Image (cartoon, rainbow, N blue to C red):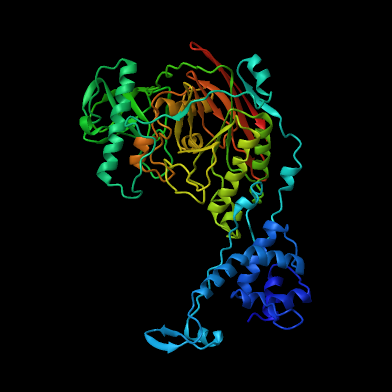
């Protein structure tokens, strides 16, 4: 039996002082408390009882202290199912005076149920702490053992809704801020572009890569991209990276670093293909090259000489393998409005999800046709996730988030939401490319897609990844004589290498087989969404509109998102975009 001292101690652990009548109802069985002992009656100890009460209090009574009234509500909601199951079990027990076999011995069951319980071991049912989010679909706050307080910095911001950057046609920009009505329905056909094997994602045994298969995967990529570069540059043939020559030749391979530190001009190594060079490597001298931009994993074609076969002296670098934009027929009778937003969706000091709630309000008001949301939704690096103070599972919290987005199907029926997975989510697998999320909650307006992916919206190709590839390349890149815009140059690497993640070795858990199958660009998209910690931007890179919406939250404050308007006919297209503060 739970004692008064133990229950009082458990409540004080959470900073709660309880009245004497509440303790009587929780702990004692006497005529004053009408024979009710909640702990004993429901076969739970004091610690489990208090934990269940805290989760119930935060979900249903806004963290109020226990009293007789909300204790009755607590009993009805939490223990009614337990008592129903107990009653059903009681009806299956043998009647008094009938035979009962216990552990192989035949005995006669006495009429007294207490004596019967001494023969049969009763196993307490495991208490389920997490709450069903369907009871309140608008409540995104997770169940915790302490009250959730919102961010004061976020609540006190004064620049909400401010447009901080604009791109595109002025007439479209004037229409971009206008809200759609429920009658602005477009006949949209949105599909994910499959790979060459007509697949959108392949199930794979993660962590079972064989080294020779992984090497073959990267060798095939080097050979394919280098041939594309040579064809575009008009180069007829290439030779081995170890071929001795006093005259100019062309060699193809992948940039690597021959040092334990960051790449620099003195430690660049070029790895050739198996077909031409038996995958051998050669150091490269860039002293005679006056313009280059290199990073590990980049496939290039070099022109130069190799007098002794042990050092290639480069004179020119070719790395342009950018594909043309796909032919499209934009057959929509109207303008397509889109919103692109990147997680995290709550500030770094709490799990109140205030920015996400404001994003839902914006979608409900403006009713865009397509919303692209990239993870993480429950960041595994968040302080409130790492300290294990949540009283429900990560999947349960994600279900609450989906329910809040699913409600938009009633208030904004014209909106379709596409959620891109992220390897940082605490409830998902930590691998890149990342498979789409899976949830038992089904909403007609929500669709899950992997990271990365390419969507086609009535002929318009939209490429999306939730991994910060721009920052990753920037941390490893070296350049000379390039000038111009660094962010545009970083984005062009994605297009010129024909892959969403060209960096190798990768600082993320990259699966080579999945990368080769699902991280390649089949064509340069019309719109490319690359969320990054870099400052937000919208730029035209070789005919592709590259958008960095940044993140919805920045520390304890609010961040930004992107809204896009596309107007096109069968021949031309016009894209306007704005970066807006949440």
Picture layout, residue 342 above or below residue 126: above
Q: Position of residue 117 (x, y in %)?
A: 52, 83
Q: Residue at x 68, y 25 (%)?
A: 179
Taking the image as shown, residue 78 lies to the left or right of residue 95, namely right
Q: Quadrant of residue 169?
A: top right
Q: Nearer the viewer, residue 241 or 129?
A: 129
Taking the image as shown, residue 276 lies to the left or right of residue 192, namely left
Q: Is residue 484 visible?
A: no
Picture layout, residue 139 above or below residue 119: above
Picture layout, residue 220 above or below residue 16: above
Q: Position of residue 413 (x, y in %)?
A: 61, 32
Q: Residue at x 69, y 61 (%)?
A: 57
Q: Residue furthest top?
A: 571
Q: Is residue 61 visible?
A: yes
Q: Position of residue 412 (x, y in %)?
A: 64, 33
Q: Position of residue 294 (x, y in %)?
A: 41, 30
The quarter of the picture where the N terminus appears is bottom right
Q: Quadrant of residue 287?
A: top left
The quarter of the picture where the C terminus appears is top right
Taking the image as shown, residue 275 lies to the left or right of residue 89, namely left
Q: Nearer the viewer, residue 377 or 274?
A: 377
Taking the image as shown, residue 407 lies to the left or right of residue 286, namely right
Circle count: 0
């Amino acid at each position: 039996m739970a004692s008064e001292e133990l229950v009082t101690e458990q409540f004080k652990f959470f900073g709660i002082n309880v009245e004497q009548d509440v303790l009587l109802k929780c702990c004692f069985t006497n005529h004053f408390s009408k024979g009710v002992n909640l702990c004993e009656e429901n076969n739970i100890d004091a610690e489990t009882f208090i934990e269940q009460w805290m989760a119930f209090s935060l979900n249903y009574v806004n963290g109020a202290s226990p009293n007789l009234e909300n204790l009755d509500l607590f009993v009805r909601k939490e223990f009614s199912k337990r008592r129903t199951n107990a009653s059903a079990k009681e009806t299956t027990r043998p009647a008094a005076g009938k035979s009962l076999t216990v552990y192989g011995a035949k005995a006669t069951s006495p009429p007294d149920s207490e004596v019967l319980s001494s023969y049969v071991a009763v196993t307490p049912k495991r208490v389920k702490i997490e709450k069903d989010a369907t009871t309140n679909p608008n409540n995104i706050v997770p169940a915790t053992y302490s009250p959730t307080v919102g961010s004061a910095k976020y609540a006190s911001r004064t620049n909400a809704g401010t447009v901080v950057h604009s791109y595109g046609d002025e007439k479209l920009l004037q229409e971009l801020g206008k809200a759609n009505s429920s009658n602005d329905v477009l006949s949209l056909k949105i599909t994910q572009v499959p790979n060459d094997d007509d697949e959108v994602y392949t199930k794979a045994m993660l962590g079972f890569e064989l080294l020779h298969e992984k090497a073959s995967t990267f060798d095939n990529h080097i050979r394919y991209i280098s041939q594309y570069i040579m064809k575009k540059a008009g180069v007829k043939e290439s030779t081995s990276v170890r071929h001795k020559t006093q005259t100019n030749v062309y060699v193809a391979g992948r940039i690597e670093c021959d040092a334990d530190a960051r790449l620099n001009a003195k430690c660049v190594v070029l790895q050739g293909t198996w077909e031409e060079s038996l995958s051998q490597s050669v150091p490269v001298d860039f002293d005679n090259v006056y313009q280059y931009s290199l990073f590990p994993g980049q496939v290039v074609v070099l022109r130069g000489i190799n007098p002794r076969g042990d050092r290639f002296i480069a004179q020119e670098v070719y790395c342009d393998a950018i594909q043309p934009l796909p032919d499209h027929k934009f057959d929509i009778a109207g303008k397509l409005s889109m919103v692109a937003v990147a997680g995290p969706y709550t500030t770094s000091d709490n799990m109140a999800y205030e920015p996400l709630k404001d994003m839902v309000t914006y979608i409900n008001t403006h009713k865009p046709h397509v919303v692209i949301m990239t993870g993480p939704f429950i960041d595994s690096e968040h302080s409130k996730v790492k300290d294990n103070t949540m009283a429900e599972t990560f999947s349960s919290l994600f279900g609450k988030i989906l329910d809040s987005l699913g409600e938009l199907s009633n208030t904004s029926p014209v909106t379709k939401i596409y959620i891109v997975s992220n390897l940082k989510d605490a409830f998902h697998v930590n691998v890149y490319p990342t498979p789409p999320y899976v949830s038992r909650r089904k909403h007609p307006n929500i669709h899950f897609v992997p990271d990365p992916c390419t969507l086609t919206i009535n002929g318009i190709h939209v490429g999306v990844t939730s991994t910060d590839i721009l920052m990753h390349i920037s941390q490893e890149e070296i350049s000379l004589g390039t000038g111009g815009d660094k962010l545009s140059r970083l984005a062009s690497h994605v297009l010129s290498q024909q892959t969403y993640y060209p960096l190798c070795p990768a600082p993320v858990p990259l699966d080579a087989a999945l990368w080769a199958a699902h991280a390649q660009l089949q064509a340069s998209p019309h719109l490319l969404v690359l969320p990054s910690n870099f400052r937000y931007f919208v730029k035209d890179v070789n005919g592709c509109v590259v958008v960095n919406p940044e993140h919805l939250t920045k520390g304890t404050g609010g961040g930004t998102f992107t809204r896009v308007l596309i107007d096109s006919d069968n021949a031309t297209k016009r894209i306007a975009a704005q970066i807006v503060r949440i």
